[in-house]
Amino acid sequence: MSSFLQSFLDPKKSWLAALHMKSLSKRLRKYGLRYDDLYDPYYDLDIKEALNRLPREIVNARNQRLKRAMDLSMKHEYLPENLQQMQTPFRSYLQDMLALVSS
């Protein structure tokens, strides 16, 4: 990508990207999700392989977050404020393994 586009998408350089990241973080915290939880293993085989290579505890934690988010969504509720404060939506657990699988 061009350097202009890279700088436009970088939250440290672009206020619009920072605003989007803040908004996304707020929405993920409401359901207790991480950004990596949004990847669909049925859509991309690299994601599926990366999830298969991760330790079972990490995959189980991902599945629990997804189940909790679906349950909250069905009930039209959000996590309590104190639990939302504890969430880390951009702490990655999949990116390193995905880079290993993709290369």
Image (cartoon, grey):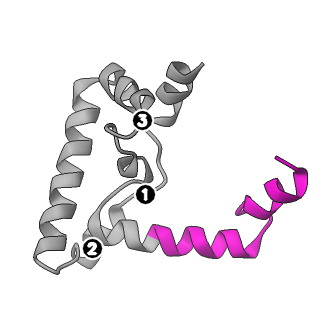
In front: mark 3 or mark 2? 3
Q: Nearer the viewer, residue 26 or 98?
A: 98
**13 horizontally vs 17: left or right:** right
Horizontal and vertical percent position of residue 57: 23, 30
Q: Residue at x 30, y 23 (%)?
A: 52
| Residue 38 locus on image (x, y percent) | 38, 52
Residue 60: x, y in percent? 19, 36
Nearest to the eye among marks 1 and 3: give it: 3
Q: Which residue is mark 1?
A: 89
Q: Secondary structure at mark 3?
A: loop
Residue 32, labelled with which disc? none
Highlighted magenta segment, given as a residue range: 1-25
Which labelled disc corresponds to residue 44? 3
Name the residue nearer the viewer: 32 or 4: 4
Horizontal side of 74 relative to 27 (left or right) equals: left
The answer to whether 73 is drawn above or below residue 63 in the figure is below
Near mark 3 (Cα within 10 A), the count class, few <14, some 14-19 or many ≥20, is: few
Q: Earlier in the sequence, mark 1 or mark 2?
A: 2
What secondary structure is marked by label 1?
Answer: loop
What is the quadrant of residue 27 in the picture? bottom left
Q: Amino acid at mark 1?
A: Pro
Tags 1 and 2 touching, CB below 8 Å = no
N-terminal of the two: label 3 or label 2?
A: 3
Q: CA distance from mark 1 to mark 3?
A: 21 Å
The count of marks equals 3
